[in-house]
Image (cartoon, rainbow, N blue to C red):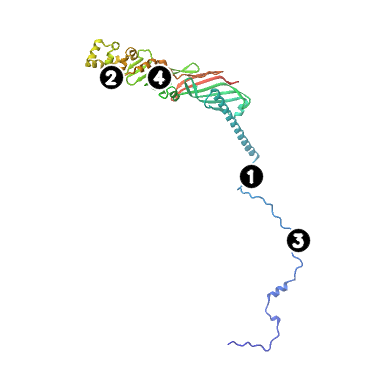
Amino acid sequence: MRTPHRMDPHPRPYDRSAAPHNPYEELGALDDGPPDEFPGEGTAGQRAVQEPEQEPEWTPPVHRRGGRRRRGRFAGLPLAVKAVVGLVVLAAFVTLADRWALLYAEHRAADTVKDRMDLAAAPEVEIGGFPFLTQLADKRLESVRVTVPDVSADRVSLAKVSATAHDIRLDADGLTSVRGARIPRLDGDVLLSFADLNRELGASQVMFTGDGRDRVRARGILPVAGHDLRLRAEATIKRQGERGIGTRIGGIRLDIGDLATYRPGTRASDGLHLTPKASADLARETRKAKVLLSVPAIVQRLGVPRATAREALSDDGKLAELTGSPRFARQAQTLNLIDLALDNPEVLRGLGLDPDLLDALSRLTRPALADRLSLAFELPEPEQGDMRLRYVRVEKDGIRVRLTGSGLALGSS
């Protein structure tokens, strides 16, 4: 149960000083009323409020890292360094122009040589000296090297002709109007390759190889009257005159299997002869031995008495005794079967030889065979000046010839 609130029957008067302290009243006492004007108002203040602050001018951003820094470094280079850089750039452009003019001149020269020599392809032309434009302005070239492949020379092709002209004097009005040239001195190199000789002279059946400094060997197959005969020959290379080389063909030999050997010529050792093996085999091949002994002319050339020959034809024992002697074999090798073929063609058939082959061999003389194997050629004679061979030498790849020239002229100079 709550206690009732009791009222004071005798209240005391209100004492203001005794009221609790109010802080807001103290703050109100400090207020002096509304101000007459705001701070900054007036002429200067109004301009500050009315005029907005001006923003800086916009510039595009620089995305390259360090771009301004590099420009600043180049701008800070000394003038001498800038001049050197400029000269280097200028020199590069001048060199480029000089090389372009050089390539153009080499191309024009190659086309000219191709047309004048009627070549299948343009040769290689290399102009020496630097710079080229100053040489052209002076109408004088230090050197020009020309390399021409596959030059026709009589019956053979020269695999490579290289020549270098020195101190050339030009008759020209600029780069595109060269009328001619004078060549005081020229040296060159000519190669007659064995590969070309094998293709052009041997028809891929005869191979040429070097045999010392001045000799060439020929080995291969030579078709004669439908028979493939083994060919052997030697050629001696020598200078012929001032502008050509000649060959002396010797040791020509055609082997008809193991039966006979043909050597063209008129000497006693030339002609068609039995091989040592075939002569020795006559002791075992009685049929072939009887063919020889049945011809009186052959018996006489063999140096066999006629009575002995008749006994050998009738008695195989006597035949074996006669044909088996070393003297008989040596004498059989001396027989020139071509001479016997004219009067005794049956002898050739008895020995296993084709009469048509022997007829073809009789017409295959030494000059005819030598012409087939000839390696000779001659350099063309120049219109002006002199050109001659210095020396000829047989190398591994072919026959190399050194040449020299003087006082040569090209064109209308």
Spot occupied by residue 263 in the image (x, y as percentages of width and height): 37, 16
Which amino acid type is marked by label 4?
Answer: Glu
Dot 1 or dot 2: first in sequence order is 1
Q: How far, Cα to Cα, is label 1 from label 3? A: 46 Å
Q: How far, Cα to Cα, is label 1 from label 4? A: 80 Å
Point out which mark residue 71 bears: 1
Which amino acid type is marked by label 3?
Answer: Gln
The image quadrant of residue 220 is top left
Which amino acid type is marked by label 2?
Answer: Asp
Spot occupied by residue 265 in the image (x, y as percentages of width and height): 38, 14
Residue at (35% x, 20% y) in the render:
255
Left or right: 7 as drawn, with respect to 254:
right
Q: Quadrant of the C terminus?
A: top right
User: Are the residues flagged by discs 4 and 3 in contact, CB closer than 8 Å?
Assistant: no
Secondary structure under badge 1? helix
Left or right: 41 as drawn, with respect to 349:
right
Task: Check disc 4 and report the residue beneath it.
Answer: 234
Pointer 1: residues within 10 angstroms few (<14), some, or many (20+)? few
Residue at (27% x, 16% y) in the render:
289
Q: How far, Cα to Cα, is label 2 from label 4? A: 30 Å
Spot occupied by residue 64 in the image (x, y as percentages of width and height): 61, 47
User: Are the residues flagged by discs 1 and 2 in contact, CB closer than 8 Å?
Assistant: no
Circle 1 or circle 2, nearest the eye: 2
Pointer 3: residues within 10 angstroms few (<14), some, or many (20+)? few
Q: Quadrant of the N terminus?
A: bottom right
Secondary structure under badge 3? helix
Spot occupied by residue 79 in the image (x, y as percentages of width and height): 65, 39
Pointer 2: residues within 10 angstroms few (<14), some, or many (20+)? some
Task: Check disc 2 and report the residue beneath it.
Answer: 281
Task: Check disc 3 and report the residue beneath it.
Answer: 46
The image quadrant of residue 232 is top left
Viewer can see residue 384: no
